[in-house]
Image (spheres, coloured by chain):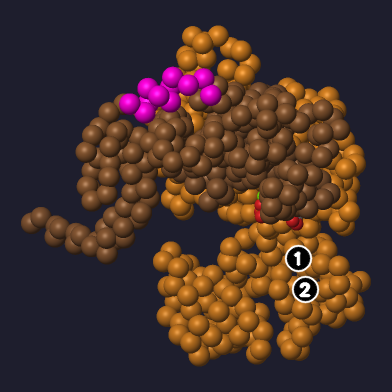
Chain colours: A brown, B orange
Amino acid sequence: MKARRKKLPVGGIAILLAMSLAMVGPILSVIIWAFAVKWRYPNLLPTEWGLKYWRIMLGRDTVIEPILTSLALTSVATTMAALICWPAAYAFARLQFPGRQLFLFSFIAANAVPKFALFVSIAVVFLNLNLVGTFWGVVVVQMLSAVLFMIWIPTAAFRSIPPALEEAGFDLGASHLRVFVMITLPQALPALAASYVLAFVSILFEVDSALLIGAPQITTMPLLLLSLSAQVIVQEAAVLCVMIWVPCFALLLLTRRFMSSKGIAQGFGA
Amino acid sequence: MAEIRIDKVSKSYGKEKALMQGIDLTIMDGEFVVILGPSGCGKSTLLRMIAGLEAVTGGTISIAGQVVNDLEPRERGCAMVFQNYALYPHMTVAENIGYALRVARVAKAERMARVAMVAGSVGLTEFLDRKPGQLSGGQRQRVAMARAIVREPKVFLFDEPLSNLDATLRVQMRHEIRKIHNRIGATSVFVTHDQQEGMTLADRLVVMNKGTIEQVGSPEEIYERPASTYVAGFIGSPAMNFLPGEIQGGAVILENGIRLPVPGLSGLDGTMVQVGLRPERLSLTGPGRGQISARVDFVEELGSARLAHVLVEDIAISVLTGDKLAIAPGDEVGIAIAPCVVQLFDGTTGKRIETAAHAAQQVETVS
Ligand SMILES: Nc1ncnc2c1ncn2[C@@H]1O[C@H](COP(=O)(O)OP(=O)(O)OP(=O)(O)O)[C@@H](O)[C@H]1O
Ligand SMILES: [Mg+2]
């Protein structure tokens, strides 16, 4: 006899639907707006579709340039943060040194301070150093906003790797560097990737640093978005939104390929 | 080949009280030594100091005549098998086994051949392409063994490698480990808190207690002539009976006034002692016979034998009896105690007291 079919979890499905609607709904409306030429009130869908606003936006130098600037800034800032934070995270996970907990906690504390206030005081320092309005000035500040993701997630990931695995490596004849590269890194990779993507996306959308440190010479994508949404043409903002959203989404999908859900969970210390 | 010499080694973690003070132990080339002791006594620490995963605080460790205190683990030529196996989850069984060879830059063809051979010898051939996550506990254990064997190390170090297996598998792997040792003959140090595992595997047993070595000897020696109440109580199952008493006029007067005659006690009058009696060396006889009389409290059926718990007035003694006597709680019985089975330990220090009976027995076994 066949086993009794499992009852459908009606309540669960309802919650799932409601949640997806709440999350996907706004994104969907932005996407529709990006491809709408005419869309007026009582119509449920645009009356005229087209790529008109894409042509307009892509035709403007003032649009392309901030996008390229943003991508360059974000890549450099995220990568540099990774190079500094990941080894630090390893040290936090494996080494015992006085003040370790305090140090680790200070990263949260730094993030609890309103960013804007923090950046204002940094801007004052940078003014004296002639870093205001420069690419590297913005990079340095943006790295700060990545620190939380880049320290906490990797620290949890490194800590979840049993020390015995590394010890077995030493015992089997490998050097410290070799053990790190062949044993530790592959296992932490999903979490490291997760931290990289999260930091990348959060830096990409971060407004304050460019506003306070970069302006007026450095215009980033979020700044452009801000200026656009102050105007009235909804489509222009929507097009830009989609333009930013697509690469981020692609990046997330890409990391998913070599990142099991277990890896992500591990990344968050589960 | 590889003799391990541990010379006045001490160890303390940070500012805490020293865990070990002046441990001395020499493990001969090709010997299988088991370090036995309760949880937390420092067995793993000692093993890890030999492997180089933990620094010694004082003293020296030498392997094959070379002091290894300052050598990295990889320079010591020890292969360790970890309690939780420490297999690499992202590598296949073949890659796990071949890891040491890869690190040593052994050419791929040779590496594969050696991995295949070792895998064959531990029955892993059909699992070479799997990841450790897809193996059973016993199979993982074999991978851990194979990973150590493939290097052909001078020294094997085992840290409770069988404690995660079920009872049947544990016995089976125990035999395999001993067979592998007999075949390869590398010096082996095996840590366990399971006395039966220790007794069956060891050429020589090292019994540890709170960071010190209580006794070193062959399993038989340790069973027959334990150096202290600690060793006597730790080794043997069911556990040894201890009866406190005092030596008077060539006999031991137990706490409840009962007199237990023991030959060869001259000159020891007034010494407070613990009398040690192994349950399997005692036997029950009819009431009024034997050295002391007792009353049956309850009986445990063990299948092959029975463990009778009897009361000598208020002192409880267990007796292992092979013959299926009809005994029931409340029965009056006698306990037959041959003089040579009585072991005496100093009442205050717990150290063994040699009696003439033992000396006589020694001579007997030697001749
Ligand atoms: N890294 C460490 N820092 C401080 N104390 C430690 C450290 N490692 C071990 N100890 C202490 O040293 C003692 C001995 O530990 P060890 O692991 O050698 O015990 P063990 O005999 O192997 O016990 P078990 O049978 O439970 O494995 C324990 O009391 C433990 O708390
Ligand atoms: Mg241990």
Q: Label 1, secondary structure: give it.
A: helix
Q: Which residue is mark 2?
A: B274
Residues at marks 2 and 1 on the same chain? yes
> Residue shown at 82%/28% (left/top)?
A130
Q: Is residue A224 above or below residue B198?
A: above
Q: Label 2, secondary structure: give it.
A: strand
**Amino acid at the residue labelled 1:** Thr
Q: Quick check: is B172 in the magenta stretch?
A: no
**Amino acid at the residue labelled 2:** Gln
Q: Is residue B124 visible?
A: no
**Furthest-left residue in view?**
A1
Chain label for disc 2: B
Disc 1 packing (10 Å; few <14; some 14–19; many ≥20): many
The percent position of residue B186, horizontal first and vertical second, equals 65, 28
> Residue shown at 62%/60% (left/top)?
B236
Task: Find the magenta span and give its range.
Answer: A52-62
